[in-house]
Protein backbone atom coordinates (compact mmCIF):
# COMPACT_ATOMS: atom_id res chain seq x y z
CA UNK A 1 0.00 0.00 0.00
CA UNK A 2 3.01 2.28 -0.40
CA UNK A 3 2.62 5.32 -2.66
CA UNK A 4 3.79 4.87 -6.26
CA UNK A 5 7.09 6.67 -6.86
CA UNK A 6 7.56 9.11 -9.73
CA UNK A 7 11.16 8.00 -10.20
CA UNK A 8 13.44 5.22 -8.94
CA UNK A 9 17.10 5.89 -8.26
CA UNK A 10 18.71 2.44 -8.24
CA UNK A 11 22.16 1.30 -7.18
CA UNK A 12 23.32 -1.97 -8.73
CA UNK A 13 25.10 -3.09 -5.57
CA UNK A 14 22.29 -3.53 -3.08
CA UNK A 15 22.91 -5.49 0.14
CA UNK A 16 20.06 -8.03 -0.08
CA UNK A 17 18.92 -8.15 -3.70
CA UNK A 18 21.19 -7.31 -6.59
CA UNK A 19 20.08 -4.13 -8.38
CA UNK A 20 20.09 -5.90 -11.73
CA UNK A 21 17.66 -8.49 -10.39
CA UNK A 22 15.44 -5.78 -8.90
CA UNK A 23 15.43 -3.82 -12.17
CA UNK A 24 14.47 -6.94 -14.10
CA UNK A 25 11.60 -7.68 -11.71
CA UNK A 26 10.39 -4.08 -11.76
CA UNK A 27 10.23 -3.89 -15.53
CA UNK A 28 8.31 -7.18 -15.72
CA UNK A 29 5.63 -5.81 -13.38
CA UNK A 30 2.99 -3.83 -15.28
CA UNK A 31 2.44 -1.45 -12.34
CA UNK A 32 6.13 -0.40 -12.41
CA UNK A 33 6.70 -0.46 -16.15
CA UNK A 34 6.19 3.27 -16.75
CA UNK A 35 8.18 4.46 -13.73
CA UNK A 36 11.55 5.78 -14.91
CA UNK A 37 14.55 4.03 -13.39
CA UNK A 38 17.86 5.87 -13.12
CA UNK A 39 20.74 3.52 -12.40
CA UNK A 40 23.19 5.40 -10.18
CA UNK A 41 26.20 3.17 -9.65
CA UNK A 42 29.86 3.38 -8.77
CA UNK A 43 30.56 0.96 -11.64
CA UNK A 44 31.55 2.37 -14.99
CA UNK A 45 32.03 -1.12 -16.44
CA UNK A 46 30.50 -1.22 -19.93
CA UNK A 47 28.99 -4.63 -19.10
CA UNK A 48 26.99 -3.05 -16.27
CA UNK A 49 25.89 -0.17 -18.51
CA UNK A 50 24.76 -2.51 -21.30
CA UNK A 51 22.98 -4.83 -18.85
CA UNK A 52 21.10 -1.92 -17.26
CA UNK A 53 19.82 -0.75 -20.65
CA UNK A 54 18.95 -4.31 -21.69
CA UNK A 55 16.85 -4.50 -18.51
CA UNK A 56 15.10 -1.25 -19.57
CA UNK A 57 16.77 1.29 -17.30
CA UNK A 58 15.96 4.79 -18.50
CA UNK A 59 19.47 6.08 -17.93
CA UNK A 60 22.76 5.08 -16.35
CA UNK A 61 24.88 7.48 -14.33
CA UNK A 62 28.24 6.68 -12.77
CA UNK A 63 28.52 8.09 -9.26
CA UNK A 64 31.08 10.84 -8.90
CA UNK A 65 33.93 10.21 -6.46
CA UNK A 66 33.18 13.17 -4.17
CA UNK A 67 30.23 14.04 -1.97
CA UNK A 68 29.89 17.41 -3.72
CA UNK A 69 29.85 15.64 -7.08
CA UNK A 70 27.11 13.28 -5.91
CA UNK A 71 25.00 16.22 -4.67
CA UNK A 72 25.40 17.99 -8.02
CA UNK A 73 24.32 14.91 -9.97
CA UNK A 74 21.34 14.27 -7.68
CA UNK A 75 20.20 17.89 -8.13
CA UNK A 76 20.50 17.52 -11.90
CA UNK A 77 18.54 14.25 -11.81
CA UNK A 78 15.84 16.02 -9.82
CA UNK A 79 15.75 18.96 -12.21
CA UNK A 80 15.61 16.80 -15.32
CA UNK A 81 13.33 13.93 -14.28
CA UNK A 82 11.00 15.73 -11.90
CA UNK A 83 10.86 19.24 -13.39
CA UNK A 84 11.59 19.00 -17.12
CA UNK A 85 10.34 15.58 -18.25
CA UNK A 86 6.65 14.96 -18.66
CA UNK A 87 6.03 11.68 -16.85
CA UNK A 88 2.97 9.52 -17.46
CA UNK A 89 0.09 10.03 -15.03
CA UNK A 90 -0.11 7.75 -12.04
CA UNK A 91 -2.57 4.93 -12.60
Image (cartoon, rainbow, N blue to C red):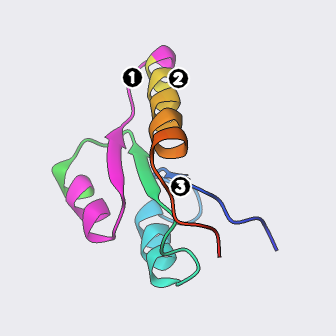
Circle 2 packing at 10 Å, graded few (<14), some (14-19), many (20+), is few
Circle 1 packing at 10 Å, graded few (<14), some (14-19), many (20+), is few
Marks 1 and 2: in contact by CB < 8 Å?
no
Residue 54 % position (x, y): 25, 69
Q: Residue at x 47, y 59 (%)?
A: 36
Q: Would residue 12 be seen by someone viewing this image from the given angle?
A: no
Circle 3 packing at 10 Å, graded few (<14), some (14-19), many (20+), is few
Q: Residue at x 17, y 50 (%)?
A: 46
Q: Nearer the viewer, residue 84 or 30?
A: 84
Q: Nearer the viewer, residue 17 or 57?
A: 57
Circle nearer the N terminus (2, 3): 3
Marks 1 and 3: in contact by CB < 8 Å?
no
Q: Nearer the viewer, residue 8 or 40?
A: 8
Q: Is residue 76 above or below residue 16?
A: above
Residue 5 part of the magenta segment: no
Circle nearer the N terminus (3, 1): 3
Single out the mark in the foreground, 2 or 3.
2
Q: Which residue is mark 1?
A: 65
- CA–CA distance between discs 3 and 1? 18 Å
Which stretch did the figure color magenta?
49-68
The kind of secondary structure element at disc 1 is: loop
Q: Residue at x 52, y 28 (%)?
A: 75
Residue 34 % position (x, y): 48, 70
Q: Which residue is mark 2?
A: 71
- Name the side, left or right, on which 49 lies relative to 8: left
The kind of secondary structure element at disc 3 is: loop
- CA–CA distance between discs 2 and 3? 20 Å
Residue 79 % position (x, y): 50, 33
Q: Which residue is mark 3?
A: 14
Amino acid sequence: HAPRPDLVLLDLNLPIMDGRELLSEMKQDQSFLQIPVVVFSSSNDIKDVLMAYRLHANCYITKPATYEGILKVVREIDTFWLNMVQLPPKE
